[in-house]
């Protein structure tokens, strides 16, 4: 399905196979990262205390779980790619949260 959506990547004759594979890995890792916004399952309260809240360790655990999701999904177990994509989502998410807080949106 990804190849159908981004078929142009695979038809570029000047790109080497490694470059094509890297583009595909980045795209699928980003798609996996987007999946964090759809995960809203109910968890036991003792586990929720690890990541629910505004403390630094809660945020750290939240983004560690995002990293795990990206790494096992689109990151294809590549630690560096998963770290980079996770940091991208940290920047996006935290900047959006800061903007909402500045606007007074709850």
Image (tube, rainbow, N blue to C red):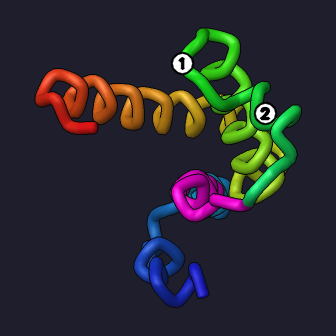
Label 2: element kind: helix
The residue at the point 59 percent across, 53 percent down is 36
For mark 1, give the secondary structure. Answer: loop
Question: In the image, residue 75 lies at what x, y percent?
Answer: 72, 50
Disc 1: which residue? 54
Q: Which quadrant of the view contains residue 91?
A: top left
Give the magenta part as a residue range: 25-41
79 lies left or right of 103: right
Q: Give the left or right position of residue 101, taking residue 65 as reference.
A: left
- Quick one: which residue is furthest to the left in this view? 103
Q: Is residue 16 visible?
A: no
Q: CA distance from mark 2 to mark 1?
A: 26 Å
N-terminal of the pair, mark 2 or mark 1, is 1
**Is residue 59 depicted above or below 14 in this figure?**
above
Q: Where residue 25 sits in the image (x, y, percent)?
A: 64, 57
Determine the residue located farthest toward the front in the rendered image.
45
Q: Nearer the viewer, residue 91 or 51?
A: 51
Residue drawn where x is 46% and y is 72% of the image: 9
Q: Are marks 2 and 1 in contact (CB under 8 Å)?
A: no
The mark lying in front, picked from 2 and 1, is 1
Residue in the image at 71% along x and 37% along y = 67
Q: Depth check: 89 or 81 in front? A: 89
Residue 7 appears in the figure:
yes
Q: Residue at x 45, y 65 (%)?
A: 14
* Quadrant (top left/top right/bottom left/bottom right) for the N terminus: bottom right
The image's mark for residue 79 is: 2
Whole-percent x and y of residue 98? 28, 23
């Amino acid at each position: 399905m990804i190849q159908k959506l981004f078929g142009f990547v695979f038809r570029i004759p000047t790109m080497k196979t490694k470059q094509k594979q890297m583009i595909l890995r980045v795209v699928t890792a980003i798609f996996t990262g987007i999946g964090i916004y759809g995960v809203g399952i109910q968890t036991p309260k003792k586990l929720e205390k690890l990541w629910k809240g505004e403390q630094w360790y809660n945020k750290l655990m939240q983004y560690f779980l995002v990293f795990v999701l990206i790494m096992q999904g689109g990151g294809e177990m590549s630690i560096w790619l998963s770290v980079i994509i996770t940091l991208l989502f940290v920047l996006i998410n935290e900047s959006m949260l800061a903007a909402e807080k500045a606007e007074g949106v709850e």
